[in-house]
Amino acid sequence: MSRSAPVVPALVLALVLAACDGGGGQGTPGGPGLRDPYFPKAGNGGYDVTHYDLRLAYDPGSRRLTGTAGITARATQDLSAFDLDLKGLDVRTVTVEGEQARWDRAGQELTVRPRDVLHDGETFQVTVRYAGTPLTLTDQDGSKEGWLPTADGAIALGEPTGSMTWFPGNHHPSDKATYDIAVTVPKGLTAVSDGEPSGETTAGGRTTFSWHTAEPMASYVATVAIGRYQVARSTVGGALPAYVAVDPARAKESRAVLAKLPEVMEWAETNFGPYPFSSTGVIVDRQDEVGYALETQNRPVFPGVLDTDTLVHELVHQWYGNSVTPRTWRDMWLSEGFATYAEWLWNEDQGGDSAQETFDSLYDGDYFGTAEADAAVWAFPPAKPSGAAYISDPPVYWRGAMVLQKIRQTVGDDTFYDIVQGWAAAHRHGNADTAQFTAYVERQAPDKDFGAIWRDWLYGDGKPPHR
């Protein structure tokens, strides 16, 4: 008589299969990009970063950066592998949940294959150790970003993709996280970052400066600035900490504008609502290759000469851009249009041209003084830049601001300020896109018709009819 095969209990069988497939479920790789309309490789699918713990050491003499990035994330699917964005630098080791992980690189993608499948909803820790000379990137519009050496240190500027040159991560505006950043530099130099200082220690001729950012931050507005700075700590509005770091070579020419920081902050809160972060400030350095300031969170970076309009612009970005962050790079006008319009409002409130007069000057072709510059405002609609090279072009800024003035004309001042303050409050520390904005405006003024504004000014090609 033959013997039949033993019956294996279902639970035992499930455990055996789980052991064979690496911890339960086959999992699939996360996407190597988020299919952003202009930067399709930016960011990565399959997980959401909640916190970055960056430990950096930089030697300005050799321009060598050594880093350890601790990344806390939550899986949004069963993951057999996932990508991090990292451009340049040499990866030494990668661990997931303390276990060595396999990894490989292709272009800006660092693909990590954990030993066990990461399950949907699981929080996990990735640690990447890396080193090398960080890259300076040239954008499609010709501007410089990434890691930018200065006369005595460096500045890290990340818009739109430069942050991947100095730490691995999910580098897309839609994935915001909190940060701890510690930077070790030769004694005598200072390292400034976002958030608030959380420690300073010196040993062996080197000083470590630690910074903590408690509010969610998109990686493109994360920064590190290293150099010899004159540092001033104070408060504005009676309680809000302010941290200002100025290169001594820029101190004299910046003094008068920096003295306006409390006034600008008070004015901005009056117009746009409560300040969304736990500190403010400014970094003024000297990096002549960079022709722009950047709204790095808590303290904007000014690589060159500082002026009042630009100070207003970058500080108002803390509301529009940093707290309410564009969902994709197509929504850039929601950041730049608001900050540009803030300049108009500031000048109006200071007794200069009204916002309507600035609008009319732009529309009539008198603002910039040259036919070419004036025509550039109408090159494309603000909500539909022509491509990645154009997301910082005049229509995004100036025509974006004109959209806001058209809304103000339509609803009146009381409702307009309710709209801009309410928008900042409704999406505080989040992401939003153009469709959400237009829907929000319509809900706040249901008796008004915005169809022509959206059709002609926001999405329409060419110069819209005005009068």
Image (cartoon, helix red, strand yellow):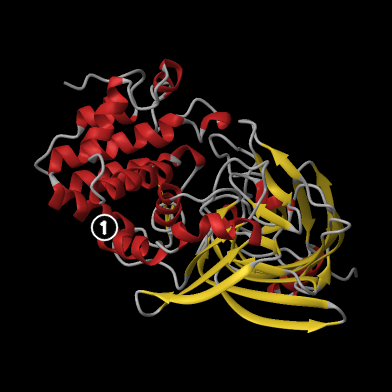
Q: Is residue 29 visible?
A: no
Position of 116 with respect to 386 (left or right) is right
Residue at 79%, 51% in the rendered image? 134
> In the rendered structure, which amino acid carries the disc numbered 1?
Asn
What residue appears at the point 39 percent right and 80 percent down from the top-left corner?
A: 239
The residue closer to the viewer here, 144 or 71, is 144
Q: Residues within 10 Å of mark 1 (few under 14, many from 20)?
A: some
Furthest residue in direction left, as rendered = 447
Find residue 27 and report its horizontal and vertical position in percent.
69, 56
Of 439 and 408, nearer the camera is 408
Please identify the quarter of the rendering in which residue 467 is found. top left
Relative placement, left or right, of 29 versus 305 is: right
Rendered position, 454 above or below 269: above
In terms of image quadrants, where is residue 261?
bottom left
Position of 385 with respect to 137 (left or right) is left
The percent coordinates of residue 210 (x first, y second) are 67, 76
Residue 422 location (% of width, % of height): 26, 58
Residue tagged 1: 271
Residue 204 vs residue 443: left or right?
Answer: right
Q: Disc count in the image? A: 1
Front residue of 267/228: it is 228
Q: Residue furthest front?
A: 252
Residue 409 found in image quarter: top left
Residue ID at (68%, 41%): 289
339, above or below 54, in the image = above
Identify the secondary structure beneath mark 1.
helix
* Residue 327 point in image, percent of width and height: 46, 47
